[in-house]
Image (cartoon, coloured by chain):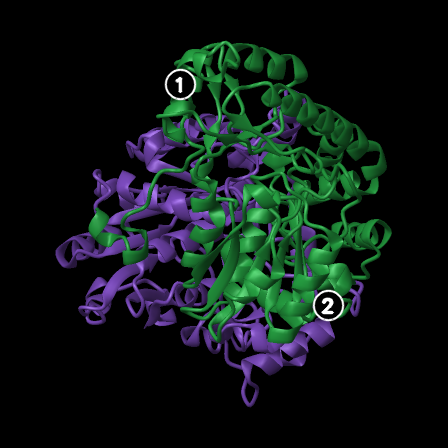
Chain colours: A purple, B green
Amino acid sequence: MKEFIQEKYKDIKESIYSVDYSSKYPDLINFGVGDPDLMTHEMIIKEAYDSQIAGHTHYENPQGYLGLREEISKAYKEDFDVKCDPSEILITMSGTEAMYIILEVILNPGEEVIVPSPYFSVYPDQIKMAEGVPVIYETKFEKEFNIEPREIEKLINEKTKAIIINTPNNPTGSVYSDETLKEVYEMAKKYNLIVICDDIYTIYSYESKFKPMISYDPEFKNVISISSMSKDYVMTGWRLGAIVAHKDLINAMTYVHENTVYAVPTLCQYAGAMGIANRKIICPPLYEEYKERMYLAYERLKKLNHVEVLRPKGTFYIFPKITVPDMTTDEVVREILEKAHVNLINGSAFGPAGEGFIRIAVTVNKDKINEAFDRIEKLDIFKK
Amino acid sequence: MKEFIQEKYKDIKESIYSVDYSSKYPDLINFGVGDPDLMTHEMIIKEAYDSQIAGHTHYENPQGYLGLREEISKAYKEDFDVKCDPSEILITMSGTEAMYIILEVILNPGEEVIVPSPYFSVYPDQIKMAEGVPVIYETKFEKEFNIEPREIEKLINEKTKAIIINTPNNPTGSVYSDETLKEVYEMAKKYNLIVICDDIYTIYSYESKFKPMISYDPEFKNVISISSMSKDYVMTGWRLGAIVAHKDLINAMTYVHENTVYAVPTLCQYAGAMGIANRKIICPPLYEEYKERMYLAYERLKKLNHVEVLRPKGTFYIFPKITVPDMTTDEVVREILEKAHVNLINGSAFGPAGEGFIRIAVTVNKDKINEAFDRIEKLDIFKK
């Protein structure tokens, strides 16, 4: 049957997230997938139910339920001082569909997208699906995985269409400074490029309040902002996100969205509107919890031999450098899995710049984090 | 900003469904969009809620919640005598995403897909998005809009990759015979083509029980079946469907699905599983209700001058022929809207073979159907 599959999809590899080790190791502690363990707020769940009982079981407007777009518009204004009209918002199946639609709408075959590495592993696949070419820009541990606009500038050529910016960053946990974002924006303006900002960890910025790049571009001429409720509201299973962009782009994106999923499920959208309206109740405890876990994991990592780690700035990912003599990162990851029953991801899954690192998602509670590190620090390779 | 949009999407037209006349005509009766008026069964709504309170607020397996795939597998066996393993099923954002993913996975640029016309208006757009070429095959009112395999065969060439079959059919309401489906399957086998069966109105077959084409192809070598809960369970707002296909194709499709929406919302999938498990309670009243409405609309249409109508066989759409002297179908549609305040769709929206017809979706209750026809039959153009 493979004969029927088009060239692009003939040789696809399995997802790094799809292996389940919990049956093999019943006491497994999973630092692997970036799915927060905390449950969606009951207020949101109840609103999904109420909306359905009230009869909203029908198709929604493909661009998105107006009530949700209005809440997002208000939140961008109040939280980020960004003025966007509901007509400049498209509701999507979380950040994943948002990124896919943007790439599909803007990329002519062969056009290039600059992606800082380490990157969320789906970006290059999505760029290739949209017939574009990912151009990888490597950030460095020594520079705290920050991006340097002048280095990015060297990669720009006549084929360059866009740059993807993800801050707070998955997988490194770094947070770019406001100055850096402003510089990247100025560069995009100079070369007439689009910056696609994957703004999906906005509440998890631990040293300064998050300020999205789109706030520098009030007419949305060069910047697109993706938001998502997956992480900021622990709603990964609800698949709820949004694109804020120029109306012309939103129209084309709505067309693609309409022809791929038609509309986001109505009950998710009502629930999302309730969540955003109550974000000052829902989000702060999540911020506090993940911040504490990040610092806990950081303190525990610092004590290990052959490990270097940066102070956490954002997200719920830590990305330590592993330099065990005579062992590859793959071997270290396997040793931790097999001997400590802790699952984490080899940094190379996030691009070449991730080689020699591991990603730890602190999506288990503090007791389990401590338990995991109690086990890990007993391994010979990490003993001081 | 249009400069940033890739060639394919520079000139997109507005959806035929997106115009809302209800503010202009407060007493509007809407026969336009195919969104059943009845509400999703409370059992399904409650299960969505219960699943979330139980903590299933997280990412689901991209291929789909196993519990739902098992229910679909059981239902295909019990209802259609089709044996499919859960590994041969991908859960999608309803039929729309299912069709898009299939086309995206199988079509190399320039490959052709045969589409019987009148067609669900999204098909050609989706084929073009996937870089394919729609080849339209026109069915005829005089032949009850049935397909003739020998006529289809004339359109097959070395570029042909697939044929889309939608029975019970939107917009014509026709239902192809088992013999016809078997012949099309044999033809697909002979030329090694894929038949994509959009099996989304399966309960709404009024003269015989629906038998999907995939039942003739136990190894799924040439047939793919799309199912959906949108119509059969009045769950349009939930965006829930599935693809049954060969495992090799399902793997490639799961990759595309994962990189576009990642997974279908978890709560929708739990709710869907509950719905399918209880289909013998949920579906028969829907069947009865829409059947009665179809025959009611049919009887009322028969009495109008300048209207010819076929006896309803399936779906909740009637597709009468309109031959008002000296008036285009567009003018007739506008006259009905402006004078009778009834919204319906010009058949030309469903392809050239729809020219001269209108589509009526009986998605309002019998009182409203009668009220609509009371108004329509008072128009001069329809008086006998």
In the foreground, B4 or B123: B123
x and y, in percent, of residue B46 in the image: 75, 30
For this view, does B307 lie left or right of residue B330?
right
Q: Which residue is mark 2?
A: A21
| Label 2 to label 1: alpha-carbon separation | 65 Å
What's the amino acid at mark 2?
Tyr
x and y, in percent, of residue B65 in the image: 71, 52
x and y, in percent, of residue A156 in the image: 20, 68
Residue located 39% across and 25% down the image: B325
In the foreground, A162 or B358: B358
What's the amino acid at mark 1?
Glu
x and y, in percent, of residue A107 in the image: 31, 60
Residue at the far left: name it: A190
Asked whether the beta carbons under mark 2 and mark 1 sit within 8 Å of each other, the answer is: no
Residue located 56% across and 68% down the image: A303
Residue located 84% across and 56% down the image: B81
Q: Quadrant of residue A139 in the image?
A: bottom left
The residue tagged with tag 2: helix, strand or loop? Answer: loop
Q: Please tell me how crowded label 2 is: few (under 14), some (14-19), or many (20+) other residues with Cα within 10 Å.
A: some
Q: Which residue is mark 1?
A: B335
Chain for numbered disc 2: A
For this view, does A128 lie left or right of residue B250?
left
Q: Is residue A201 visible?
A: no
Residue located 33% across and 53% down the image: A196
